[in-house]
Image (cartoon, rainbow, N blue to C red):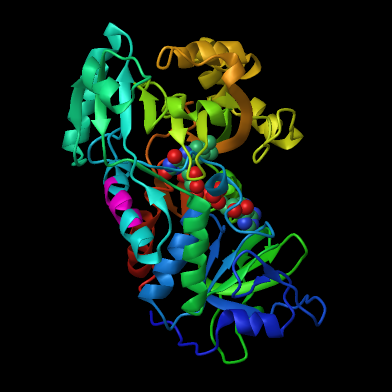
Protein backbone atom coordinates (compact mmCIF):
# COMPACT_ATOMS: atom_id res chain seq x y z
CA UNK A 1 0.00 0.00 0.00
CA UNK A 2 1.45 3.36 -0.99
CA UNK A 3 1.27 6.06 1.62
CA UNK A 4 0.33 9.60 0.67
CA UNK A 5 3.09 12.12 0.29
CA UNK A 6 3.17 15.01 2.73
CA UNK A 7 5.03 18.18 2.08
CA UNK A 8 4.22 19.97 5.35
CA UNK A 9 6.50 19.34 8.29
CA UNK A 10 4.37 17.78 11.03
CA UNK A 11 5.93 19.90 13.78
CA UNK A 12 5.11 23.16 11.95
CA UNK A 13 1.54 22.02 11.36
CA UNK A 14 1.00 21.07 14.99
CA UNK A 15 2.67 24.23 16.27
CA UNK A 16 0.32 26.33 14.15
CA UNK A 17 -2.62 24.49 15.72
CA UNK A 18 -1.44 25.28 19.22
CA UNK A 19 -0.67 21.71 20.29
CA UNK A 20 0.98 21.79 23.70
CA UNK A 21 4.45 20.39 24.14
CA UNK A 22 5.76 20.36 20.58
CA UNK A 23 9.50 20.09 20.73
CA UNK A 24 11.12 23.03 19.01
CA UNK A 25 14.36 22.86 17.05
CA UNK A 26 16.25 23.80 20.23
CA UNK A 27 16.92 20.43 21.86
CA UNK A 28 15.90 19.96 25.47
CA UNK A 29 13.18 22.59 25.48
CA UNK A 30 9.50 22.24 24.86
CA UNK A 31 8.46 25.24 22.83
CA UNK A 32 5.56 27.01 24.57
CA UNK A 33 2.75 27.52 22.14
CA UNK A 34 0.12 30.18 21.95
CA UNK A 35 -3.40 29.78 20.67
CA UNK A 36 -4.94 27.68 23.43
CA UNK A 37 -5.57 23.97 23.60
CA UNK A 38 -7.35 21.83 21.10
CA UNK A 39 -9.87 19.09 21.48
CA UNK A 40 -10.79 18.05 17.97
CA UNK A 41 -8.96 15.24 16.24
CA UNK A 42 -7.30 17.27 13.54
CA UNK A 43 -3.66 16.17 13.61
CA UNK A 44 -2.59 13.27 11.51
CA UNK A 45 0.55 11.34 10.75
CA UNK A 46 1.44 8.44 8.53
CA UNK A 47 3.35 6.81 11.39
CA UNK A 48 3.36 7.57 15.13
CA UNK A 49 6.01 6.28 17.50
CA UNK A 50 4.94 6.07 21.15
CA UNK A 51 7.84 6.70 23.57
CA UNK A 52 10.69 9.18 23.41
CA UNK A 53 13.45 7.00 24.85
CA UNK A 54 16.51 5.90 22.89
CA UNK A 55 14.67 3.04 21.14
CA UNK A 56 11.71 5.21 20.05
CA UNK A 57 13.92 8.08 18.92
CA UNK A 58 16.36 5.83 17.05
CA UNK A 59 13.39 4.12 15.35
CA UNK A 60 11.78 7.45 14.42
CA UNK A 61 15.10 8.61 12.95
CA UNK A 62 15.58 5.39 10.97
CA UNK A 63 12.01 5.52 9.63
CA UNK A 64 12.19 9.12 8.46
CA UNK A 65 15.62 8.62 6.86
CA UNK A 66 14.20 5.61 5.00
CA UNK A 67 10.89 7.28 4.11
CA UNK A 68 11.55 11.03 3.90
CA UNK A 69 8.17 11.75 2.30
CA UNK A 70 6.08 10.31 5.14
CA UNK A 71 4.86 12.40 8.07
CA UNK A 72 6.14 10.79 11.24
CA UNK A 73 5.51 11.83 14.84
CA UNK A 74 6.89 10.79 18.22
CA UNK A 75 4.67 11.16 21.29
CA UNK A 76 6.18 11.20 24.77
CA UNK A 77 4.40 11.53 28.11
CA UNK A 78 7.12 13.51 29.88
CA UNK A 79 8.01 17.14 29.19
CA UNK A 80 11.53 16.05 28.20
CA UNK A 81 12.87 13.19 26.13
CA UNK A 82 14.94 10.22 27.31
CA UNK A 83 14.39 10.74 31.03
CA UNK A 84 13.60 7.18 32.06
CA UNK A 85 15.76 4.12 31.34
CA UNK A 86 17.73 6.01 28.70
CA UNK A 87 18.62 8.69 31.24
CA UNK A 88 19.21 6.30 34.16
CA UNK A 89 21.69 3.65 33.10
CA UNK A 90 25.34 2.62 33.41
CA UNK A 91 26.25 4.23 30.10
CA UNK A 92 28.24 1.21 28.94
CA UNK A 93 28.69 0.45 25.24
CA UNK A 94 28.51 -3.32 25.55
CA UNK A 95 30.59 -5.49 23.25
CA UNK A 96 28.07 -8.36 22.89
CA UNK A 97 29.98 -11.03 24.83
CA UNK A 98 27.17 -12.10 27.18
CA UNK A 99 24.34 -13.05 24.90
CA UNK A 100 23.26 -16.44 23.55
CA UNK A 101 24.78 -16.90 20.07
CA UNK A 102 22.24 -16.24 17.29
CA UNK A 103 19.93 -14.38 19.68
CA UNK A 104 18.69 -10.93 18.71
CA UNK A 105 20.66 -9.50 21.63
CA UNK A 106 23.91 -11.05 20.40
CA UNK A 107 23.43 -9.89 16.80
CA UNK A 108 22.04 -6.44 17.52
CA UNK A 109 24.51 -5.65 20.32
CA UNK A 110 27.59 -6.49 18.22
CA UNK A 111 26.19 -4.51 15.27
CA UNK A 112 24.84 -1.76 17.52
CA UNK A 113 28.13 -1.12 19.34
CA UNK A 114 29.92 -0.59 16.01
CA UNK A 115 27.12 1.72 14.85
CA UNK A 116 27.16 3.75 18.11
CA UNK A 117 30.94 4.33 17.84
CA UNK A 118 30.54 5.35 14.19
CA UNK A 119 27.60 7.66 15.01
CA UNK A 120 29.43 9.31 17.94
CA UNK A 121 32.46 9.92 15.69
CA UNK A 122 30.23 11.46 13.02
CA UNK A 123 28.34 13.70 15.46
CA UNK A 124 31.32 14.37 17.74
CA UNK A 125 29.52 12.98 20.76
CA UNK A 126 32.15 12.24 23.41
CA UNK A 127 32.73 8.60 24.35
CA UNK A 128 35.58 6.64 25.87
CA UNK A 129 36.53 3.19 24.64
CA UNK A 130 38.08 2.42 28.02
CA UNK A 131 37.62 -1.37 27.86
CA UNK A 132 36.39 -3.83 30.42
CA UNK A 133 37.67 -6.70 32.54
CA UNK A 134 35.30 -9.51 33.54
CA UNK A 135 37.07 -10.87 36.59
CA UNK A 136 36.91 -14.29 38.27
CA UNK A 137 37.81 -13.91 41.94
CA UNK A 138 37.01 -17.49 42.98
CA UNK A 139 38.35 -20.71 41.48
CA UNK A 140 34.80 -22.00 40.91
CA UNK A 141 34.06 -19.05 38.58
CA UNK A 142 36.82 -19.95 36.12
CA UNK A 143 34.88 -22.54 34.05
CA UNK A 144 32.02 -20.01 33.65
CA UNK A 145 34.52 -17.30 32.68
CA UNK A 146 36.06 -19.56 30.02
CA UNK A 147 32.61 -20.46 28.68
CA UNK A 148 31.78 -16.75 28.47
CA UNK A 149 35.01 -16.13 26.55
CA UNK A 150 34.06 -18.85 24.03
CA UNK A 151 30.60 -17.30 23.70
CA UNK A 152 32.16 -13.90 22.99
CA UNK A 153 34.32 -15.42 20.25
CA UNK A 154 31.24 -17.09 18.77
CA UNK A 155 29.40 -13.77 18.80
CA UNK A 156 32.27 -12.14 16.87
CA UNK A 157 33.33 -9.72 19.65
CA UNK A 158 36.59 -8.03 18.71
CA UNK A 159 39.85 -8.19 20.65
CA UNK A 160 38.91 -10.62 23.46
CA UNK A 161 41.75 -12.14 25.53
CA UNK A 162 41.84 -14.40 28.58
CA UNK A 163 44.37 -12.92 30.99
CA UNK A 164 45.90 -13.93 34.33
CA UNK A 165 46.72 -12.18 37.60
CA UNK A 166 49.80 -10.26 36.44
CA UNK A 167 48.02 -8.89 33.34
CA UNK A 168 44.96 -7.94 35.42
CA UNK A 169 47.32 -5.82 37.58
CA UNK A 170 48.80 -4.15 34.47
CA UNK A 171 45.33 -3.05 33.38
CA UNK A 172 43.78 -2.41 36.80
CA UNK A 173 46.53 -2.03 39.40
CA UNK A 174 44.13 -2.12 42.37
CA UNK A 175 42.01 -5.06 41.16
CA UNK A 176 42.61 -8.59 42.35
CA UNK A 177 41.47 -11.64 40.42
CA UNK A 178 42.52 -15.12 39.36
CA UNK A 179 41.65 -14.80 35.69
CA UNK A 180 39.80 -12.25 33.55
CA UNK A 181 38.42 -11.61 30.10
CA UNK A 182 39.97 -8.47 28.69
CA UNK A 183 37.37 -6.82 26.49
CA UNK A 184 38.96 -3.74 24.89
CA UNK A 185 35.97 -2.99 22.62
CA UNK A 186 33.72 -1.95 25.56
CA UNK A 187 33.25 1.78 26.04
CA UNK A 188 31.19 4.40 27.84
CA UNK A 189 28.96 7.19 26.59
CA UNK A 190 26.10 9.39 27.82
CA UNK A 191 23.08 7.70 26.21
CA UNK A 192 20.78 10.66 26.88
CA UNK A 193 23.08 12.78 24.71
CA UNK A 194 22.98 10.13 21.99
CA UNK A 195 19.16 9.95 22.18
CA UNK A 196 18.79 13.74 21.98
CA UNK A 197 21.02 13.73 18.93
CA UNK A 198 18.72 11.11 17.32
CA UNK A 199 15.81 13.47 18.12
CA UNK A 200 17.62 16.34 16.43
CA UNK A 201 18.31 14.25 13.29
CA UNK A 202 14.64 13.24 13.23
CA UNK A 203 13.38 16.81 13.51
CA UNK A 204 15.85 18.11 10.94
CA UNK A 205 14.48 15.48 8.54
CA UNK A 206 10.94 16.85 9.10
CA UNK A 207 9.71 14.69 11.98
CA UNK A 208 7.51 16.00 14.82
CA UNK A 209 7.93 15.41 18.53
CA UNK A 210 5.04 15.94 20.92
CA UNK A 211 5.96 15.93 24.61
CA UNK A 212 3.50 16.01 27.54
CA UNK A 213 1.43 13.56 25.49
CA UNK A 214 0.61 10.52 27.62
CA UNK A 215 -1.09 7.92 25.47
CA UNK A 216 -4.23 6.63 27.12
CA UNK A 217 -5.93 4.80 24.27
CA UNK A 218 -5.11 3.43 20.83
CA UNK A 219 -8.09 2.21 18.82
CA UNK A 220 -9.48 1.80 15.32
CA UNK A 221 -11.24 4.98 14.14
CA UNK A 222 -14.97 4.97 13.52
CA UNK A 223 -15.46 4.97 9.74
CA UNK A 224 -16.84 8.52 9.65
CA UNK A 225 -13.90 10.07 11.49
CA UNK A 226 -11.13 8.17 9.79
CA UNK A 227 -10.87 10.41 6.73
CA UNK A 228 -8.93 13.67 6.74
CA UNK A 229 -9.94 16.70 4.63
CA UNK A 230 -7.77 15.50 1.75
CA UNK A 231 -9.54 12.12 1.88
CA UNK A 232 -6.59 10.23 3.32
CA UNK A 233 -7.48 7.25 5.41
CA UNK A 234 -6.29 7.32 9.05
CA UNK A 235 -7.63 4.17 10.65
CA UNK A 236 -5.97 4.61 14.07
CA UNK A 237 -6.90 7.14 16.74
CA UNK A 238 -4.45 7.78 19.57
CA UNK A 239 -5.91 9.62 22.58
CA UNK A 240 -3.95 11.10 25.46
CA UNK A 241 -4.88 11.58 29.11
CA UNK A 242 -6.16 15.11 28.35
CA UNK A 243 -8.59 13.76 25.76
CA UNK A 244 -6.59 15.10 22.80
CA UNK A 245 -6.45 12.90 19.72
CA UNK A 246 -4.16 12.31 16.81
CA UNK A 247 -4.85 10.04 13.88
CA UNK A 248 -2.44 7.91 11.97
CA UNK A 249 -2.07 4.96 9.67
CA UNK A 250 0.56 3.00 11.59
CA UNK A 251 1.93 2.89 15.13
CA UNK A 252 5.20 1.65 16.61
CA UNK A 253 5.24 1.48 20.42
CA UNK A 254 8.53 1.79 22.34
CA UNK A 255 7.22 2.52 25.83
CA UNK A 256 9.91 0.93 28.02
CA UNK A 257 8.50 0.31 31.51
CA UNK A 258 4.95 0.66 30.15
CA UNK A 259 5.28 -1.53 27.08
CA UNK A 260 2.81 -4.14 28.41
CA UNK A 261 0.21 -1.53 29.38
CA UNK A 262 0.46 0.19 25.99
CA UNK A 263 0.03 -3.14 24.23
CA UNK A 264 -2.98 -3.98 26.40
CA UNK A 265 -4.69 -0.62 25.91
CA UNK A 266 -4.37 -1.05 22.15
CA UNK A 267 -6.30 -4.32 22.47
CA UNK A 268 -3.19 -6.47 21.98
CA UNK A 269 -1.60 -9.06 24.24
CA UNK A 270 -0.69 -7.91 27.78
CA UNK A 271 1.93 -10.70 27.97
CA UNK A 272 4.83 -10.60 28.45
CA UNK A 273 4.29 -8.42 31.52
CA UNK A 274 6.86 -5.88 32.58
CA UNK A 275 8.40 -6.26 36.00
CA UNK A 276 10.27 -3.21 37.25
CA UNK A 277 13.65 -3.87 38.89
CA UNK A 278 15.33 -1.00 40.76
CA UNK A 279 19.06 -0.62 40.37
CA UNK A 280 20.79 1.58 42.96
CA UNK A 281 24.28 2.90 42.32
CA UNK A 282 26.96 3.96 44.76
CA UNK A 283 29.51 6.60 43.79
CA UNK A 284 33.20 6.51 44.62
CA UNK A 285 34.41 9.70 46.31
CA UNK A 286 36.50 11.78 43.85
CA UNK A 287 39.74 11.28 45.81
CA UNK A 288 39.34 7.49 45.38
CA UNK A 289 38.59 7.42 41.66
CA UNK A 290 42.22 6.50 40.95
CA UNK A 291 41.31 2.96 42.12
CA UNK A 292 39.42 2.20 38.89
CA UNK A 293 40.64 2.74 35.30
CA UNK A 294 38.05 1.01 33.10
CA UNK A 295 34.95 -1.13 33.59
CA UNK A 296 35.36 -4.01 36.05
CA UNK A 297 32.57 -6.62 36.02
CA UNK A 298 31.98 -9.87 37.93
CA UNK A 299 31.41 -13.20 36.20
CA UNK A 300 27.63 -13.07 35.69
CA UNK A 301 25.21 -15.46 37.34
CA UNK A 302 23.66 -17.24 34.36
CA UNK A 303 20.29 -17.56 36.15
CA UNK A 304 19.65 -13.83 35.82
CA UNK A 305 19.69 -11.36 32.94
CA UNK A 306 21.47 -8.74 35.09
CA UNK A 307 25.24 -8.48 34.90
CA UNK A 308 25.96 -8.00 38.59
CA UNK A 309 27.33 -5.05 40.54
CA UNK A 310 30.18 -3.54 38.57
CA UNK A 311 32.64 -0.62 38.60
CA UNK A 312 31.90 1.82 35.79
CA UNK A 313 33.70 5.04 34.89
CA UNK A 314 31.36 7.85 33.78
CA UNK A 315 31.92 10.43 31.10
CA UNK A 316 32.09 13.14 33.81
CA UNK A 317 35.00 11.40 35.55
CA UNK A 318 32.95 9.83 38.36
CA UNK A 319 33.05 6.12 39.11
CA UNK A 320 29.71 4.38 39.71
CA UNK A 321 29.42 1.10 41.58
CA UNK A 322 26.32 -0.96 40.94
CA UNK A 323 23.54 -1.38 40.11
CA UNK A 324 21.91 -3.96 42.35
CA UNK A 325 18.62 -5.59 41.27
CA UNK A 326 15.68 -5.21 43.65
CA UNK A 327 12.00 -5.62 42.80
CA UNK A 328 10.54 -2.10 42.55
CA UNK A 329 7.19 -1.06 44.02
CA UNK A 330 6.64 1.50 41.30
CA UNK A 331 7.49 1.70 37.61
CA UNK A 332 9.64 4.82 37.20
CA UNK A 333 9.94 5.04 41.02
CA UNK A 334 13.43 6.34 41.67
CA UNK A 335 13.17 7.10 45.40
CA UNK A 336 13.48 4.28 47.95
CA UNK A 337 9.89 4.58 49.22
CA UNK A 338 8.14 5.23 45.90
CA UNK A 339 5.03 3.07 45.80
CA UNK A 340 2.18 2.58 43.35
CA UNK A 341 -0.84 0.59 44.44
CA UNK A 342 -1.64 -0.40 40.86
CA UNK A 343 1.92 -1.57 40.19
CA UNK A 344 2.07 -3.55 43.43
CA UNK A 345 -1.37 -5.10 42.84
CA UNK A 346 -0.20 -6.23 39.42
CA UNK A 347 2.85 -7.83 41.01
CA UNK A 348 0.66 -9.63 43.57
CA UNK A 349 -1.88 -10.98 41.09
CA UNK A 350 0.77 -11.93 38.55
CA UNK A 351 1.25 -15.62 39.22
CA UNK A 352 4.40 -15.72 37.10
CA UNK A 353 6.02 -13.15 39.32
CA UNK A 354 5.09 -14.92 42.55
CA UNK A 355 6.75 -18.04 41.12
CA UNK A 356 9.87 -16.06 40.24
CA UNK A 357 10.04 -14.57 43.73
CA UNK A 358 9.64 -17.95 45.42
CA UNK A 359 12.23 -19.61 43.17
CA UNK A 360 14.80 -16.89 43.79
CA UNK A 361 13.92 -15.94 47.33
CA UNK A 362 17.43 -16.06 48.78
CA UNK A 363 18.93 -14.09 45.86
CA UNK A 364 16.19 -11.44 46.17
CA UNK A 365 16.54 -11.20 49.96
CA UNK A 366 20.31 -10.84 49.62
CA UNK A 367 19.95 -8.03 47.04
CA UNK A 368 17.43 -6.30 49.34
CA UNK A 369 19.82 -6.63 52.28
CA UNK A 370 22.70 -5.17 50.25
CA UNK A 371 20.47 -2.29 49.15
CA UNK A 372 19.76 -1.42 52.80
CA UNK A 373 23.23 -1.94 54.25
CA UNK A 374 26.21 -0.36 52.52
CA UNK A 375 28.59 -2.62 54.44
CA UNK A 376 27.22 -5.66 52.64
CA UNK A 377 27.74 -4.13 49.18
CA UNK A 378 31.23 -2.95 50.13
CA UNK A 379 32.12 -6.47 51.23
CA UNK A 380 31.17 -7.67 47.75
CA UNK A 381 33.16 -4.87 46.07
CA UNK A 382 36.22 -5.67 48.19
CA UNK A 383 36.46 -9.06 46.48
CA UNK A 384 37.64 -7.06 43.46
CA UNK A 385 39.28 -3.99 45.00
CA UNK A 386 40.23 -4.78 48.61
CA UNK A 387 41.20 -1.17 49.36
CA UNK A 388 37.64 0.15 49.07
CA UNK A 389 36.02 1.00 52.41
CA UNK A 390 32.57 2.25 53.41
CA UNK A 391 33.99 5.75 53.93
CA UNK A 392 35.08 5.88 50.24
CA UNK A 393 31.54 5.70 48.87
CA UNK A 394 28.35 7.71 48.73
CA UNK A 395 24.84 6.69 47.73
CA UNK A 396 24.27 7.57 44.07
CA UNK A 397 21.45 7.63 41.53
CA UNK A 398 18.92 4.90 40.79
CA UNK A 399 17.56 3.40 37.60
CA UNK A 400 14.54 1.16 37.06
CA UNK A 401 14.82 -1.62 34.50
CA UNK A 402 11.89 -2.82 32.42
CA UNK A 403 12.22 -6.59 32.42
CA UNK A 404 9.67 -8.76 30.66
CA UNK A 405 8.33 -11.85 32.43
CA UNK A 406 6.42 -14.66 30.74
CA UNK A 407 3.30 -16.29 32.20
CA UNK A 408 5.39 -19.12 33.67
CA UNK A 409 7.50 -16.77 35.74
CA UNK A 410 10.55 -16.88 33.46
CA UNK A 411 12.45 -13.67 32.82
CA UNK A 412 12.40 -13.15 29.06
CA UNK A 413 16.02 -12.95 27.99
CA UNK A 414 15.93 -11.75 24.43
CA UNK A 415 14.57 -8.58 22.84
CA UNK A 416 10.91 -9.07 21.87
CA UNK A 417 9.07 -7.31 19.05
CA UNK A 418 5.43 -8.17 18.66
CA UNK A 419 2.88 -7.54 15.92
CA UNK A 420 -0.51 -6.70 17.34
CA UNK A 421 -3.67 -8.82 17.05
CA UNK A 422 -7.05 -8.24 15.38
CA UNK A 423 -7.75 -5.31 13.05
CA UNK A 424 -5.32 -3.07 14.83
CA UNK A 425 -2.66 -5.75 14.45
CA UNK A 426 -2.28 -4.85 10.80
CA UNK A 427 -1.30 -1.33 11.81
CA UNK A 428 0.82 -1.69 14.93
CA UNK A 429 4.21 -3.02 16.00
CA UNK A 430 5.11 -3.24 19.69
CA UNK A 431 8.60 -3.28 21.18
CA UNK A 432 7.85 -5.54 24.16
CA UNK A 433 11.22 -6.22 25.76
CA UNK A 434 14.18 -3.92 25.24
CA UNK A 435 16.31 -4.19 28.38
CA UNK A 436 20.12 -3.88 28.46
CA UNK A 437 21.92 -3.78 26.02
CA UNK A 438 19.13 -1.98 24.12
CA UNK A 439 20.87 1.40 24.47
CA UNK A 440 24.05 -0.05 22.88
CA UNK A 441 21.91 -1.81 20.28
CA UNK A 442 19.56 1.11 19.58
CA UNK A 443 20.80 1.89 16.07
CA UNK A 444 20.77 -1.77 15.05
CA UNK A 445 17.29 -2.22 16.60
CA UNK A 446 16.07 0.84 14.72
CA UNK A 447 17.26 -0.54 11.37
CA UNK A 448 15.47 -3.80 12.12
CA UNK A 449 12.28 -1.96 13.06
CA UNK A 450 12.42 0.22 9.95
CA UNK A 451 12.78 -2.93 7.77
CA UNK A 452 9.98 -4.67 9.67
CA UNK A 453 7.65 -1.68 9.34
CA UNK A 454 8.36 -1.45 5.61
CA UNK A 455 7.62 -5.13 5.05
CA UNK A 456 4.71 -5.54 7.42
CA UNK A 457 2.90 -2.36 6.39
CA UNK A 458 3.96 -2.61 2.72
CA UNK A 459 5.30 0.96 2.64
C1 LIG B 1 20.00 0.68 35.80
C2 LIG B 1 20.13 0.42 34.31
C3 LIG B 1 21.39 0.21 33.74
C4 LIG B 1 21.51 0.00 32.36
N1 LIG B 1 22.75 -0.07 31.78
C5 LIG B 1 22.86 -0.16 30.44
C6 LIG B 1 24.12 -0.09 29.80
O1 LIG B 1 25.15 0.13 30.45
N2 LIG B 1 24.18 -0.25 28.45
C7 LIG B 1 23.06 -0.48 27.70
O2 LIG B 1 23.18 -0.65 26.49
N3 LIG B 1 21.84 -0.51 28.28
C8 LIG B 1 21.72 -0.34 29.61
N4 LIG B 1 20.49 -0.33 30.20
C9 LIG B 1 19.31 -0.56 29.37
C10 LIG B 1 18.91 0.67 28.59
O3 LIG B 1 18.96 1.84 29.37
C11 LIG B 1 17.50 0.44 28.06
O4 LIG B 1 17.49 -0.82 27.41
C12 LIG B 1 17.08 1.49 27.04
O5 LIG B 1 17.26 2.77 27.57
C13 LIG B 1 15.62 1.25 26.66
O6 LIG B 1 15.19 2.35 25.90
P1 LIG B 1 13.64 2.56 25.64
O7 LIG B 1 13.53 3.70 24.71
O8 LIG B 1 13.05 1.25 25.26
O9 LIG B 1 13.03 2.88 27.08
P2 LIG B 1 12.94 4.26 27.88
O10 LIG B 1 14.21 5.00 27.84
O11 LIG B 1 12.43 3.90 29.24
O12 LIG B 1 11.87 5.08 27.09
C14 LIG B 1 10.50 4.74 27.05
C15 LIG B 1 9.73 6.04 26.93
O13 LIG B 1 8.35 5.75 26.73
C16 LIG B 1 7.61 6.77 27.38
N5 LIG B 1 6.26 6.31 27.64
C17 LIG B 1 5.86 5.30 28.43
N6 LIG B 1 4.52 5.22 28.45
C18 LIG B 1 4.06 6.21 27.65
C19 LIG B 1 2.76 6.65 27.29
N7 LIG B 1 1.64 6.07 27.78
N8 LIG B 1 2.63 7.70 26.44
C20 LIG B 1 3.73 8.31 25.94
N9 LIG B 1 4.99 7.95 26.28
C21 LIG B 1 5.16 6.90 27.11
C22 LIG B 1 8.41 6.97 28.68
O14 LIG B 1 8.09 8.20 29.31
C23 LIG B 1 9.83 6.89 28.18
O15 LIG B 1 10.36 8.15 27.85
C24 LIG B 1 20.34 -0.08 31.56
C25 LIG B 1 19.08 0.16 32.13
C26 LIG B 1 18.98 0.44 33.48
C27 LIG B 1 17.63 0.78 34.05
Relative to 449, residue 321 above or below: above
Residue at far top of view: 139
Taking the spot 29% from the left edge, 13% from the top edge, the residue there is 141
Report x, y in % for residue 273: 54, 38
Taking the spot 39% from the left edge, 21% from the top edge, the residue there is 303
Residue at far bottom of view: 230
Report x, y in % for residue 292: 42, 28
Taking the spot 74% from the left edge, 71% from the top edge, the residue there is 20
Is residue 428 or residue 129 the one in the foreground? Answer: 129
Relative to 308, residue 250 above or below: below
Relative to 235, residue 6 above or below: below
Is residue 175 or residue 377 the one in the foreground? Answer: 175
Whether the magenta-drawn stretch holds residue 111 is answered as yes
The answer to whether one can see residue 186 in this image is yes
Q: Please state the extent of the stretch shown in magenta in the rendering.
A: 110-116
Q: Quadrant of the N terminus?
A: bottom left
Whether the magenta-drawn stretch holds residue 194 is answered as no
Report x, y in % for residue 164: 21, 18
Amino acid sequence: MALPLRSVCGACRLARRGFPGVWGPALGKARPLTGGGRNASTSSFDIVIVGGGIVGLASARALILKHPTLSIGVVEKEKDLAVHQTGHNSGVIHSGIYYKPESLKAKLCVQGAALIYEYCNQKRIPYNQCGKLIVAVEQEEIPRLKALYERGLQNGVQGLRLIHQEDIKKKEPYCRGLMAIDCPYTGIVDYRKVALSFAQDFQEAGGSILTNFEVNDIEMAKESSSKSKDGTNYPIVITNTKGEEIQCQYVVTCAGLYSDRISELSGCNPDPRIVPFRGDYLVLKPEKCYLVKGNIYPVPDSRFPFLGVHFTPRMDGNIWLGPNAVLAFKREGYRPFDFSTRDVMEIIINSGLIKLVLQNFSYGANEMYKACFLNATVKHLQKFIPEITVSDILRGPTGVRAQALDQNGNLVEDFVFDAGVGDIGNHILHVRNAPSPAATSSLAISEMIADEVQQRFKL
